[in-house]
């Protein structure tokens, strides 16, 4: 995956930032003359935080190479991916043990999942991303190609009898054939891109149809019953099967937007080729400016906050932003703020754990993997000119 094709962002609306439009996207000027030579945290803070987490995960790896449960390849793949993104090489003994463990979940249909799992899409997507990250010599080319084909067959499209007008069309679910959701669809898009899909790939464009329908914004791309009920430009979990938002319903029956899905939606639209001029992108970023936070998952408080931190960091990295200016005009060096927040939340053991245990974030291996992945986007860098 490349990040260079879109240096977004957008929309002055209530802001004083100046945006220079280019074919490849938007270049953000440093507002109010506050340019600095570097953005991001102090290197020693980041290194110390990261190394403590790496040491923790080395120590919690089971002898068989797994973390938490030997039948949960999704967690083990996330941990492995976080370690590789944090600088461990493919030859590191911890990574080698983990890869050997994950290879045991490669199935004849091309998927990478526990045979009795209800999470085939999720586990395959995360595993594909992990194998892609350790595939510099091409040894996993066939495995990745087979997993790519498996994921394409799972995607909700005409193969499942859906028309393109159906609210679930183009999405991905956990793989147990109930309904698609934005969380799984964002991982599908990332996995397909890692496997080589271009923005005009039919699977990517079909996924974009679903992503557009999870946004609280009425457009030509979104005519679901929920599209205009809230209209704040944020995203929710799914419009399919009657619609669901983990943040609940508004008084008028609208599905409330929340942070993790809004960053997931924005990132997915960028990966699918949308630019800052698209009204869907503008509306999503406007929601982010109104709800910027490194303290909580906006709309959900502490629920899923480590998943949020990772999605927040990945999305803003994809947008290639140095700063986010909120609607009060405050400039946020998001890398620095996020890294410092995570350093503050880190346990003496080097782990992170969420007291709000929803979505398994009470598992320190999972929460630590999310935190490490978030930190992998927080390295200091020169300010863009």
Image (tube, helix red, strand yellow):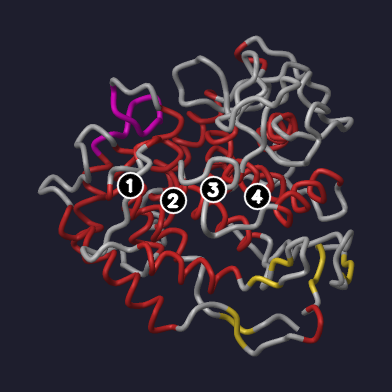
Task: Give 335 or 247, whichever is nearer the viewer.
Answer: 247
Q: Which type of secondary structure does the marked residue at label 3 adopt?
A: loop
Q: Which type of secondary structure does the marked residue at label 4 adopt?
A: helix
1 or 4: tag closer to the N-terminus: 4
Q: Position of residue 255 (x, y in %)?
A: 68, 27
Label ID, residue 267: 4
Q: Position of residue 115 (x, y in %)?
A: 29, 23
Instruction: Tell me: residue 184, above or below residue 259.
Output: above
Q: Residue furthest bottom?
A: 37
Q: Position of residue 305 (x, y in %)?
A: 47, 48
Residue of label 2: 306
Q: Which type of secondary structure does the marked residue at label 1 adopt?
A: helix
The CA span between labels 1 and 3 is: 17 Å
Q: Residue 93, located in which quarter of the rendered image?
A: bottom left
Q: Disc 4 or disc 2, which is closer to the eye?
A: 2
Main SS, magenta region, reads loop
Task: Give 37 or 123, whichever is nearer the viewer.
Answer: 37
Q: Residue furthest left?
A: 63
Task: Give 255 or 97, whichever is nearer the viewer.
Answer: 255
Residue drawn at x 39%, y 43% as measured from the top left: 127
From the viewer's perspective, tell me whether residue 267 is left or right of residue 212. Answer: left
Q: Disc 1 or disc 3, which is closer to the eye?
A: 3
The CA span between labels 1 and 2 is: 9 Å
């Amino acid at each position: 995956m490349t990040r260079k094709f879109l240096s977004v962002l957008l929309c002055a609306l209530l802001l004083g930032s100046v945006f220079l439009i280019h074919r490849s996207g938007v270049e953000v000027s440093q507002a109010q003359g506050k340019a600095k030579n570097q953005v991001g945290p102090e290197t020693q803070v980041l290194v110390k935080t990261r190394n403590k987490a790496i040491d923790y995960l080395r120590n919690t790896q089971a002898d068989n190479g797994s973390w938490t449960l030997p039948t949960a390849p999704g967690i083990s793949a996330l941990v492995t991916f976080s370690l590789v993104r944090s600088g461990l090489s493919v030859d590191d003994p911890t990574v080698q043990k983990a890869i050997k463990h994950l290879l045991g979940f490669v199935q004849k249909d091309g998927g990478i999942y526990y045979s009795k799992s209800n999470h085939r899409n999720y586990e395959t997507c995360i595993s594909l991303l992990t194998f892609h990250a350790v595939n510099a010599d091409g040894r996993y080319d066939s495995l990745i190609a087979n997993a790519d084909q498996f994921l394409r067959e799972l995607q909700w499209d005409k193969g499942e009898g859906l028309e393109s007008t159906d609210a679930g069309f183009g999405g991905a679910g956990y793989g147990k054939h109930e309904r698609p959701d934005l969380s799984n669809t964002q991982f599908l898009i990332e996995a397909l891109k890692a496997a080589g899909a271009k923005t005009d790939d039919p699977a990517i464009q079909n996924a974009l149809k679903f992503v557009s329908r999870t946004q609280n914004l009425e457009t030509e791309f979104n005519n679901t019953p929920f599209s205009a009920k809230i209209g704040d430009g944020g995203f929710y979990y799914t419009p399919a099967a009657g619609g669901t938002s983990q943040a609940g319903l508004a008084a008028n029956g609208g599905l409330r937007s929340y942070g993790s899905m809004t960053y997931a939606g924005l990132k997915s639209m960028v990966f699918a080729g949308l630019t800052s001029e698209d009204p869907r992108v503008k509306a999503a970023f406007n929601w982010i400016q109104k709800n910027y936070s490194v303290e909580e998952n906006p709309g959900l408080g502490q629920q899923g906050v480590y998943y949020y931190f990772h999605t927040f960091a990945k999305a803003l990295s994809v947008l290639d932003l140095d700063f986010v200016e909120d609607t009060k005009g405050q400039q946020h060096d998001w890398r620095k703020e996020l890294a410092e927040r995570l350093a503050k939340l880190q346990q003496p053991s080097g782990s992170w754990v969420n007291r709000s245990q929803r979505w398994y974030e009470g598992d320190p291996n999972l929460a630590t993997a999310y935190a490490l992945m978030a930190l992998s986007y927080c390295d200091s860098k020169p300010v863009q000119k």
